[in-house]
Amino acid sequence: MNKLLKIWKENKPVINAWLSIPNSFTAEAFGKMGWDAITIDMQHGQTDYSASLPMLQALSSSQSTPMVRVPWSEPGIIMRMLDLGMLGIIAPMINNKQDCERFVSYCYYPPIGQRSFGPMRAQLIHGSDYFSKANENILSFAMIETQEAVDNLDDILSVPNLTGVYIGPADMSVSYGMKPKFDVKEDPVFSNIKLIAKKANEKGKIAGIHNGTTQYAKEMIDIGFKLVTISSDFRSMSAHAQSVIDDMKEKTKNSNPTEAY
């Protein structure tokens, strides 16, 4: 059973990591930290299909569920990533019911979808009975990140077999004429965020969102989000390294070294 399904059955939130750097060692390190899920970002991260394989191999000894945000809702890459052993797919820019129906169909085998059979690594990793259990364990998340998607939210949430929706706050902000950012508190985006959580829960779907800070992520859990991502490997590394150099530069700026003889 997909570990995340068990967490949600217990009405707990899933804490998700985000990998933008195409590096198996980074993936292995994150895999030892205790994240519930780890998502490889193929849309805006630097990772492609070839880089994803060693990253997934590095996660094999991890207890974290592997997921991926694909570059686009396109059957070829979705099916290939599932064949590699991914247990969750996040698809960007799902704007209406038709977009969502097509996306969901790519994730599942017939009779509920049109996924083609050939799970070479997935069967190796998840077992010889992979085909019979894949449909009940694969997660499908449609990204809601435009005004059009918000307007069509009810229709998107009505799509059978869709696991849930995932908010891209930066693109949603842009869609409403605002600057791209995480941890949005300004309307109409903040109102949309609360509405999406409410409606997803009413429809029995999982609501997910990308966050910049743990504080905001905790607030999102309080309003009903069951999948929260915090920052990314690149952002975490950059922020910490920047704080180190800023601290040291402050020291050297204020210091009065003694004259050397």
Image (cartoon, rainbow, N blue to C red):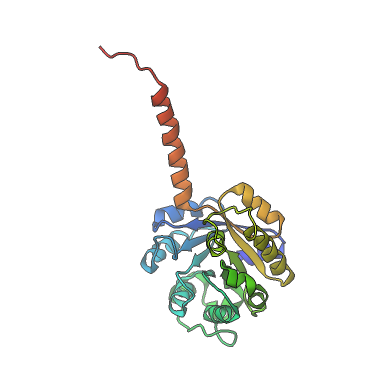
Q: Is residue 161 left or right of residue 20?
A: right
Tell me where residue 52 sits by quadrant: bottom left
- The answer to whether residue 226 of the structure is visible from this angle is no
- The answer to whether residue 130 of the structure is visible from this angle is yes
Q: Residue at x 56, y 84 (%)?
A: 113
Residue positioned most to the front? 177
Q: Residue at x 40, y 20 (%)?
A: 255
Quadrant holding the C terminus: top left
Tell me where residue 108 sits by quadrant: bottom right
In percent of width and height, residue 42 lies at: 44, 65
Q: Is residue 252 left or right of residue 180?
A: left
In percent of width and height, residue 111 lies at: 59, 88
Quadrant holding the N terminus: bottom right
Residue 201, above or below 235:
below
Between residue 18 and residue 125, name the one nearer to us: 18
In percent of width and height, residue 196 lies at: 67, 66
Residue 1, above or below 112:
above
Q: Is residue 45 left or right of residue 154?
A: left
Residue positioned most to the bottom? 111
Between residue 146 and residue 65, name the one nearer to us: 146
Residue positioned most to the left? 261
